[in-house]
Image (cartoon, rainbow, N blue to C red):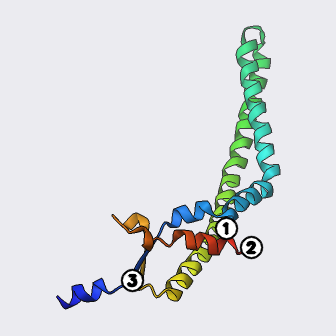
Amino acid sequence: MLSSAAMAAQKIGVVNVQGIFQSLPQAAVIQENIRNEFKDQIEEIGRMEKDIKYYMEKRERDAATMSDAERKELEDKLISLRDEYAGKTQPLQQQIQTRQGEERDKLLGLIKQAIDGIAEKENYDLVLNSNAVAYMAEANNLSQQVVDQVSKIK
């Protein structure tokens, strides 16, 4: 009986961390910065994709009129392009994912600081992520306060 009374006296807040992250202007800026950072490599891969597509279409279109030597040369070219494409695509994807992770972690750190600050300032005993809560009163939702606070940070 005593423990339920003590629990009732606790002040509990709720935040939607994913929603906060997506609402922040910094998230869009991060995505744009990463796109710009890897722009040249992404464009190069796009050109390679177009080249592969062109040669595949050429192979299908001209197969009947090509000599064996031309067909072999075209196949070798396609194999070479695909190998080069694979060799550049996977590392680029890994680099982009690494950078996104680094930037996401920085932003999540700011979100955590904001949650901690709001919880301390407003005397919350516990703050839960909304995906772990079946019901909450809107008065306990701290998400917009967190968005407002983190949005001010440049």
Looking at the rendered structure, the number of numbered marks drawn on it comes to: 3
The label on residue 154 is: 2
Taking the spot 53% from the left edge, 61% from the top edge, the residue there is 19
The kind of secondary structure element at disc 3 is loop
Dot in front, 2 or 3: 3
Residue 58 pos. (x, y %):
76, 19
The label on residue 11 is: 3
Vertical position of residue 144 compared to residue 95: above or below: below
Label 1 crowd (10 A; few <14 / some 14-19 / many >=20)? some
The label on residue 103 is: 1
Q: Considering only order in the chain, which callout, 1 or 3, is on the residue closer to the N terminus? A: 3
Taking the spot 62% from the left edge, 66% from the top edge, the residue there is 104
Q: Residue furthest left?
A: 1
In the rendered structure, are the residues bearing label 2 and label 3 in contact, judged by CB atoms less than 8 Å apart?
Answer: no
Quadrant (top left, top right, bottom left, bottom right) of the C terminus: bottom right
Q: Name the residue type under label 2.
A: Lys
Q: Residue furthest bottom?
A: 2
Label 3 crowd (10 A; few <14 / some 14-19 / many >=20)? some
Seen from the viewer's position, the closer of residues 154 and 152 is: 152
Residue 11 pos. (x, y %):
39, 83
Residue 97 pos. (x, y %):
64, 59
